[in-house]
Amino acid sequence: MSRKPDSTVRKRNRFPVFASIGTVAALALIVSFLRFRGHEPSLPARDHFSASQTTAAATGTNSQPNEVPDTRLRGQLASARAELNAVDAKIRVQTSELTSVTKAKDTLNSRVADIERENAGLLADKAQLEARITQLQEEFEKSRSEKNAGDVAMALQDTEIRELRKKVADQTEALGRQQEFAAKAGDVRELVVARNLHIIDVHDRDGDGKSQRASGRIFYTEGKSLIFYAYDLADPRKVDARLSFHVWGERLGAEKPIQSLGIFHTDDVSDGRWVLTFDDPHVLAQIDSVFVTVESSRKTVKEPGGRKILFAFLGDKPNHP
């Protein structure tokens, strides 16, 4: 008897067994995936899953899903949502600030445009008045040479010329003020859109802890410019020409010499406002604080020696980015 047929039968019987094991493993993977996705499997799937559990138990295979990845993914999802909410809140705040700055910029642009139109009108009026003065002077010279020109007419023309000249002077002064305001409006517009802008209110106290009369406000753009407005440095009813108010800059804790930033100039007498503008980036890079001293205007001042009345620190982070 030959043993060859028996071997052939064994090989043929192995294929259904392997096919059944593969089917059961595939069904176990599908059921685990459905549980991981959070969906309820259908009735046929539960039947197959029961069959797969029976087969897996028979073959010693463990097909229970692992809940650890699911918990870890949920934690990561919660963390990502929290970060997304934080970023969304920050975007809303920055959008609100950008809207405010844009509105301020539009208002300044509108004001500058109005001033430019007013300047154009003043220039046109000035040209017309100058042409009229020239015409009157020519008529005046002509009337002087004529025998029929009376003294009264000449006096009237002379009076009109003086009045027109005064009006031209007034118009010229008004034009200068408008041009100065337009230049300041341009500076303010640059400050509004500056990235690293510090706005610092200065309120100092004397040795007894009482607030001093003098106060100030600083517009400081890092590495570019510093505009210092001061109020009530002196009593406007008792302005003393012998005194001057010097502004100094220094780096706290450093041995470098104190830098002179200049002297306050009157900006508005009726409002008691003084101003100093400084735009040397090399000097601004070497200081982190400024202060004001009262000095004698009768001598050359190279270093602070008078009474200190105002102080401000510039080293904090920009409060208007």
Image (cartoon, rainbow, N blue to C red):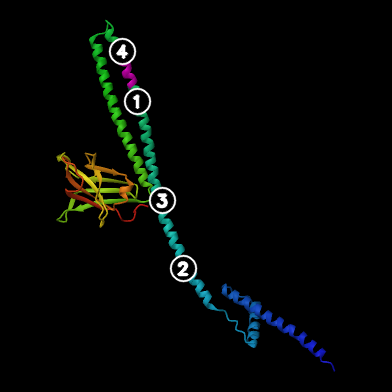
Which numbered disc, 4 or 2, marks the residue that appears first in the sequence? 2
For residue 20, the mark is none
Residue 133 quadrant = top left
**Could you say whether the residue bearing mark 4 is in a helix, strand or loop?**
helix
Residues at marks 3 and 1, CA–CA distance in whole angstroms: 41 Å
Can residue 40 be seen in the rendering of this structure? no
User: Which dot marks residue 98?
Assistant: 3
Locate residue 140 relative to residue 245 in the image: left or right.
right
Q: What separation in Å lies between label 2 and label 1 (alpha carbons)?
A: 69 Å
Amino acid type at mark 4: Glu
Residue at 47 percent of width and 65 percent of height: 81
Do the numbered discs 3 and 4 sit on residues whose CB atoms are within 8 Å? no
Task: Name the element at disc 1.
Answer: helix
The residue range painted magenta reads 130-140
Picture disc at residue 139: 4
Q: CA distance from mark 4 to mark 2?
A: 90 Å
Confirm whether the magenta stretch covers residue 137.
yes
Rounded to the nearest angstrom, the CA distance separating label 2 from label 3 is: 29 Å
